[in-house]
């Protein structure tokens, strides 16, 4: 009787696949991590630079996903961390700290590519584009005595976020460039692709069906907001990179 009423006799269904949405954010750091930032700042002021780096990279590390690898031997050390599809690698010694991210491979010099990079260099505050033989990359470096936690945070943030965005755009815009340093990327499972595609099509249809039914003059602001909402929902659902991300950002920029 109870089995019929409450379904206790039913077999347990297989758990649904874990699907991740949105872009990673480290805004909500636990108290322990915030304390490590304070320690890093205090240690740097005491000129204990290597100990300051220990605390800084511990602050950056998300223990749940282990996104930062950090090793130190005396006054020298190395680190790696992920940002989207790119991996930032760096090292330090008694004199300086350097970090870089590989963007693409350029078998032959290209004037259009170099001009694009030269123009983009003007908008960078901490990092710069560089060419190492045929490897196109971005680099950030600092003298140890100037490598405050704040400078490291914003410098590495610029390096990683710009690198993660520009690698796809450059390869798509210039046929001479080749993808590289992507062996660590895992393909999205087919089940997840199907679910995200289903909702993408559903949201697009809903939006395109709703807008024609509204008065363009009376509800112009509402229509704009509906389109802006769609842009953010697509970004949250798919976390696109490259050209699609660039176009979505342009649409959002038009709204504001």
Image (spheres, rainbow, N blue to C red):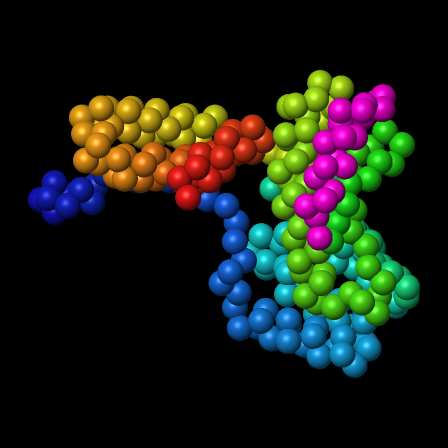
Q: Is residue 21 visible?
A: no
Q: Position of residue 117 (x, y in %)?
A: 74, 35
Which of the 4 image quarters holds residue 184?
Answer: top right
Relative to 161, is 117 above or below? above
Residue range in magenta is: 103-125
Q: Is residue 34 left or right of residue 235?
A: right
**Quadrant holding the N terminus:** top left
Q: Which residue is at 64% across, 30% downward?
A: 168
Q: Is residue 113 magenta?
A: yes
Query: Is 46 placed above or below 245 here?
Result: below
For the C terminus, give its image quadrant.
top left
Q: Is residue 245 magenta?
A: no
The residue positioned 10% from the left and 44% from the top of the image is 5
Name the one closer to the observer, 58 or 93. Answer: 93
Q: Position of residue 123 (x, y in %)?
A: 68, 46
Q: Residue at x 44, y 37 (%)?
A: 254
Q: Is residue 130 visible?
A: yes
Percent across and percent down for residue 47 are 82, 77
């Amino acid at each position: 009787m109870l089995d019929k009423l409450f379904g206790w006799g039913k077999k347990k269904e297989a758990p649904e696949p874990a699907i991740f949405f949105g872009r990673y954010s480290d805004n909500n750091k636990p108290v322990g991590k915030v304390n490590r930032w304070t320690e890093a700042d205090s240690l740097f002021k005491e000129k204990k630079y290597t100990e300051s780096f220990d605390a800084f990279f511990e602050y950056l590390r998300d223990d749940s996903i282990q996104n930062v690898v950090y090793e130190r031997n005396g006054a020298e050390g190395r680190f790696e961390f992920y940002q989207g599809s790119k991996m930032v690698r760096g090292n330090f010694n008694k004199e300086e700290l350097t970090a870089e991210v590989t963007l693409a491979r350029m078998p032959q010099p290209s004037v259009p590519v170099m001009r694009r990079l030269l123009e983009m260099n003007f908008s960078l505050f901490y990092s710069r584009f560089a060419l190492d033989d045929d490897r196109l990359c971005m680099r950030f470096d600092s003298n140890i005595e100037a490598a405050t936690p704040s400078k490291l945070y914003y410098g590495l943030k610029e390096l990683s976020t710009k690198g993660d965005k520009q690698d796809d755009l450059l390869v798509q815009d210039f046929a001479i460039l080749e993808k590289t340093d992507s062996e660590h990327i895992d393909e999205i499972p087919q089940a997840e692709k199907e679910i995200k595609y289903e909702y993408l099509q559903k949201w697009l249809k809903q939006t395109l069906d709703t807008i024609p039914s509204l008065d363009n003059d009376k509800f112009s602001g509402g229509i704009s907001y509906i389109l802006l909402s769609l842009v953010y929902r697509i970004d949250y659902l798919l976390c696109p990179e490259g050209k699609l991300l660039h176009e979505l950002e342009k649409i959002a920029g038009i709204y504001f």
